[in-house]
Image: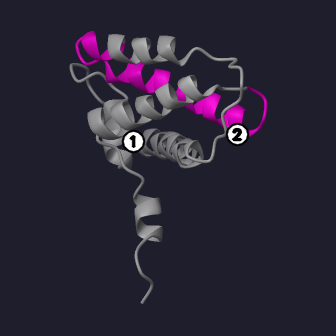
Amino acid sequence: MTVRFFMLQAHYRSTLDFGNEAMEASDKGFKRLMNAVGLLDGLKSSATSDVDMAALQQRCYDAMNDDFNSPVLIAELFEATRIINSVHDGKLKVDADNLEILKNIIATFVFDVLGLKDEQAANDDLPKS
């Protein structure tokens, strides 16, 4: 998954500069994204919202409609990661409607479009022998 994430961080028409430092940075970014995804189901909605998830969702679609611009999409997903972490830490509030949009953004773009999955969580779910 780290290699996939690394390749998605560059536009498909551009060249990749493959190296150890780039892979380490990609691994760190991928783990940050997956950690936020893991927090998503535990978020509680509030009566009010400090964020507009519909605008973020539209920016994600705009990135895909711009010649499958995966680097821009990943930047928007890191904005979603920031929001998830801030809501989890109590720094931001999100209402039920925006929380549902946020969950949809993650499901659609992280899992369905980019094809990423949390291999560590999948391995944790395996029975121990």
Dominant secondary structure (helix, strand or loop) of the stretch shown in magenta: helix
Reply above or below: 87 against 59. below
Residue 92: where, in percent of width, then height?
A: 74, 26
Residue at (30%, 30%) from the top-left corner?
Answer: 16
Residue 115, located in which quarter of the rendered image? top left
Specify whether residue 85 is painted magenta: yes
Does dot 1 land on a helix, a strand or a loop? loop
Residue 69 image offset from top left, x and y in percent: 31, 17
Residue 95 lies left or right of residue 24; in this view the side is right
Left or right of residue 40: residue 20 = left
Q: Nearer the viewer, residue 92 or 24?
A: 92
Res. 57 image quadrant? top left
Q: Earlier in the sequence, mark 1 or mark 2?
A: 1
Q: Quadrant of the C terminus?
A: bottom left
Q: Nearer the viewer, residue 72 or 10?
A: 72
The kind of residue tagged 2 is His
Magenta segment: 63-92
Can you say whether 57 is above or below 94 in the image?
above
Left or right: where does residue 52 sit relative to residue 55? right
Q: Are marks 1 and 2 in contact (CB under 8 Å)?
A: no
Position in image of residue 35 (x %, y %): 56, 47
- Residue named by callout 2: 88
Q: Amino acid at mark 1?
A: Gly
Mark 1 Cα shell of 10 Å, populated few (<14), some (14-19), many (≥20)? few
Residue 13 image point, x, y percent = 21, 19
Pointer 2 local density, CA inside 10 Å: few below 14, some 14–19, many at least 20: some
